[in-house]
């Protein structure tokens, strides 16, 4: 129980730091290697310090996370990772991750959102004139191309942090190019308000982004990731999820796959013998000739990690999108090494869907403006807490 850092009257132990790093590696699909741990440790520790400050402020302001809010948050994680209800506890235990670390993270996220909204309500007002002005701009630019963009923001609070944060940005870029999920990395590392939704900023015109970000996003194709972008406040990583010409809801079509997926779980550090056994099991699943066959075999071998459903290419990682486009209906994929184990996927059918038409409503515009202001309030609020805090880092 050595001390990693002291934050006012609270302690962050080395155990806390190690457990959180393990959780970050797994959720972001980062390799469990000494080099990775060395790269991400400063940022993970900084996140834990911020978490302590948020929890301390929430206690001071009598703001709490309810049991229902935590249960819903845990359920959302299971849903995002194709897990059955209650399977997350088994997943954490099998990989030696302290469940309390995850609960602390979720609690801090919930109470911080409440604190920021309370602060924004006291100091920030979105007027009807602002909404009218934003709607007018949207109508004026309705025929212009738009991009759906996701972001990861890594703050640089002082010049001494620049190299450390730049190295982390490059490391995350490299890992995402090798298959780490952008949305999961954003949830763990991004310091923007969009982190809660996997970094998704929604549909934007170039003029709605800061010039340096718009310039970096312009040449990217859907599914492409930008290199780290330095701004006055820190580093950004951008992912272009999709592009469309014309106004929102202009009838753009997107591909939707109906799939069956089976994943055979692997322990955190599997031996070669375990890997060979899992590979043989997955190869045996490739004998399935149809989705019902694969679903039946998968439910026999891995009932908790077999699922079926529709996936939209707009929300899909580039590697998975490319794989599904290559598969014919009823054709099993080659074995795929995933974060939770070794898997196989089969396409049942492919369809195209047309986006719903309709202009953005006043409520849509209000929420967009509110999110921007909450982001500003959140950064300023946390910066003030950091400046007023006693923080002693010991690792």
Image (cartoon, rainbow, N blue to C red):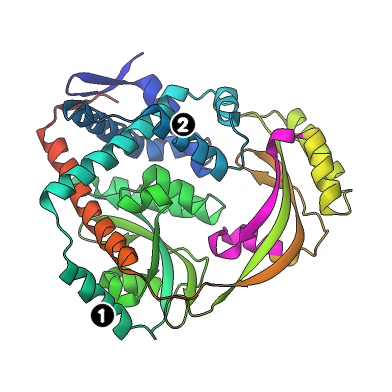
Q: Which residues are magenta?
A: 302-324
Instruction: Using the image as rendered, state which of residue 298 and residue 84 is in the foreground.
Output: 84
Q: Earlier in the sequence, mark 2 or mark 1?
A: 2
Rendered image quadrant of residue 12: top left
User: At which x and y percent is residue 260?
Assistant: 74, 50
Residue 113 on the magenta span: no
**Total numbered labels placed on residues in the image:** 2
Tell me the residue at 37%/49% (across/down). Answer: 195
Residue 374 visible in the snapshot: yes
Instruction: Using the image as rendered, state which of residue 292 and residue 1 is in the foreground.
Output: 292
Residues packed near mark 1 inside 10 Å, few (<14), some (14 to 19) or many (20 plus): few
Q: Quadrant of the C terminus?
A: top left
* SS at circle 1: helix
Residue 26 visible in the snapshot: no
Rendered image quadrant of residue 134: bottom left
182, above or below 15, in the image: below
Q: Which residue is mark 2?
A: 71
Position of residue 212 in the picture relative to residue 276 (left or right): left
Tell me the residue at 57%/59% (across/down). Answer: 316
Tell me the residue at 19%/41% (across/down). Answer: 382
Residue 314 on the magenta span: yes
Give the Cα separation between the discs numbered 2 and 1: 41 Å
Tell me the residue at 41%/76% (across/down). Answer: 146
Rendered image quadrant of residue 254: bottom right
* SS at circle 2: helix
Residues packed near mark 2 inside 10 Å, few (<14), some (14 to 19) or many (20 plus): few
Q: Which residue is mark 1?
A: 136
């Amino acid at each position: 129980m050595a001390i990693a850092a002291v934050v006012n009257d609270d302690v962050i132990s080395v155990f806390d730091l190690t457990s959180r790093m393990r959780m970050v590696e797994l959720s972001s699909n980062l390799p469990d290697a000494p080099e990775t741990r060395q790269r991400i440790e400063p940022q993970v520790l900084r996140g834990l310090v911020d978490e302590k400050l948020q929890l301390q402020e929430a206690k001071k302001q009598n703001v709490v996370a309810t049991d229902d809010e935590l249960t819903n948050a845990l359920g959302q994680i299971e849903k995002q990772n194709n897990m059955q209800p209650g399977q997350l506890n088994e997943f954490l235990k099998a990989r030696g991750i302290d469940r309390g670390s995850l609960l602390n993270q979720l609690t801090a996220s919930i109470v911080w959102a409440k604190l920021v909204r309370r602060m924004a309500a006291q100091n920030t007002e979105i007027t009807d004139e602002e909404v009218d002005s934003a709607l007018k701009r949207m109508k004026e630019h309705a025929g212009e191309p738009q991009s759906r963009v996701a972001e990861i923001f890594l703050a640089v609070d002082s010049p001494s942090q620049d190299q450390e944060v730049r190295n982390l940005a490059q490391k995350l870029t490299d890992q995402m190019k090798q298959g780490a999920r952008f949305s999961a990395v954003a949830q763990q590392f991004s310091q923007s308000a969009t982190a809660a939704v996997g970094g998704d900023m929604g549909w934007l015109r170039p003029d709605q982004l800061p010039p340096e970000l718009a310039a970096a996003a312009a040449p990217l194709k859907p599914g492409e990731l930008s290199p780290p972008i330095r701004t006055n406040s820190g580093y950004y990583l951008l992912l272009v999820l999709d592009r469309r010409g014309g106004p929102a809801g202009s009838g753009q079509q997107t591909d939707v796959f109906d799939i069956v997926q089976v994943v055979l779980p692997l322990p955190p550090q599997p031996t070669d013998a375990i890997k060979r056994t899992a590979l043989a099991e997955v190869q045996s699943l490739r004998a399935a000739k149809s989705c019902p066959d694969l679903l039946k075999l998968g439910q026999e071998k891995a009932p908790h990690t077999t699922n079926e459903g529709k996936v939209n290419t707009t929300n899909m990682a580039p590697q998975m999108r490319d794989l599904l486009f290559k598969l014919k209906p009823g054709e099993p994929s080659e074995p795929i090494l995933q974060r939770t184990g070794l898997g196989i996927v089969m396409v049942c059918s492919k369809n195209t869907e047309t986006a719903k038409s309709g202009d953005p409503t006043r409520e849509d515009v209000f929420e967009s403006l509110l999110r921007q202001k909450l982001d500003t309030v959140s950064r300023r609020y946390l910066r003030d807490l950091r400046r007023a805090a006693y923080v002693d880092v010991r690792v």
